[in-house]
Amino acid sequence: EAGVAQSPRYKIIEKRQSVAFWCNPISGHATLYWYQQILGQGPKLLIQFQNNGVVDDSQLPKDRFSAERLKGVDSTLKIQPAKLEDSAVYLCASRWTSGNNEQFFGPGTRLTVL
Amino acid sequence: SQQGEEDPQALSIQEGENATMNCSYKTSINNLQWYRQNSGRGLVHLILIRSNEREKHSGRLRVTLDTSKKSSSLLITASRAADTASYFCATVGNQAGTALIFGKGTTLSVSS
């Protein structure tokens, strides 16, 4: 079974620039999550999708962050404009809709904002 | 916001020793999960324990859950150098299907 794919793996940008991350979940996984992990902390949920609909985006800073999953498969997360405090690892995870809620994580994208 | 706190923040042991990590959380849960994260393999699910369970085993892992104290522990027996990683507990609220809420993690170093 192929895992969750993410790209790019690393990104360095200047503050106020824009950046986009891509995620392709495990085939058949209807639920997709984006997490932000700041160095030394645990991952924090940004947004949760069920198919192509948003389930929870209460912790997404909507003034600068946006995410979409138009066809209910792969997803993109965008930051525009980036701030220094956005430096973090952005993790994508997916899971079956039913079952025990075990989530499968991608390798993450490490973003550095200078 | 973080749901829980792991204790200790860092742990250093020798190969063959046992490692115990603790996790406390704040609100009622549906289940609690433990994940491992290292640079080589990213974040990997280890074990899940439901709110009506008290103990669970998987290989060298043993997890306990005390819902009255809102706490859990992860025991790794006969540790190996390959167990070196950060370990996170994550909770799922009573509404099934909600996202994981992670603690800050315990960094485990196992030396040979």
Image (tube, coloured by chain):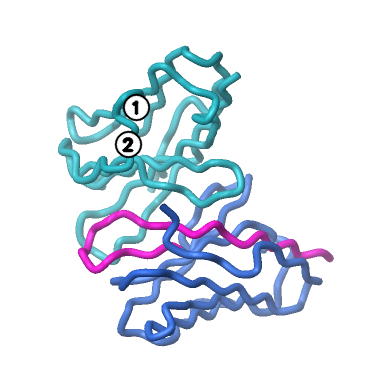
The residue at which mark 1 appears reads as A65
Characterize the local packing of mark 1: few (<14), some (14-19) or many (20 or more) Cα atoms within 10 angstroms.
some
Q: Which mark is residue A102?
A: none
Quarter occupied by the C terminus of chain A: top right
Residue A55: x and y in percent read 19, 45
Look at label 2 and name its amino acid: Leu
Q: Is there CB contact under 8 Å for labels 2 and 1?
A: yes
- What is the chain identity of the residue bearing mark 2? A
Which residue does the image show at 41% across and 44% down from the upper left?
A3
Which residue does the image show at 24% across and 68% down from the upper left?
B94
Q: Is residue B78 visible?
A: yes
Sequence-earlier tag: 2 or 1? 2
Residue A80: x and y in percent read 38, 18
Question: In whole angstroms, how far apart are the C-alphas of marks 2 and 1?
Answer: 7 Å
User: Are both tags, 2 and 1, on one chain?
Assistant: yes
Q: Which mark is residue A60?
A: 2
Q: Is residue A27 visible?
A: no
Where disc 1 sits, the SS reads strand
Looking at the rendering, the stretch of residues picked out in magenta corresponds to: B90-112
Tell me the shade of chain B.
blue
Residue B31: x and y in percent read 33, 71
* Chain (cyan): A
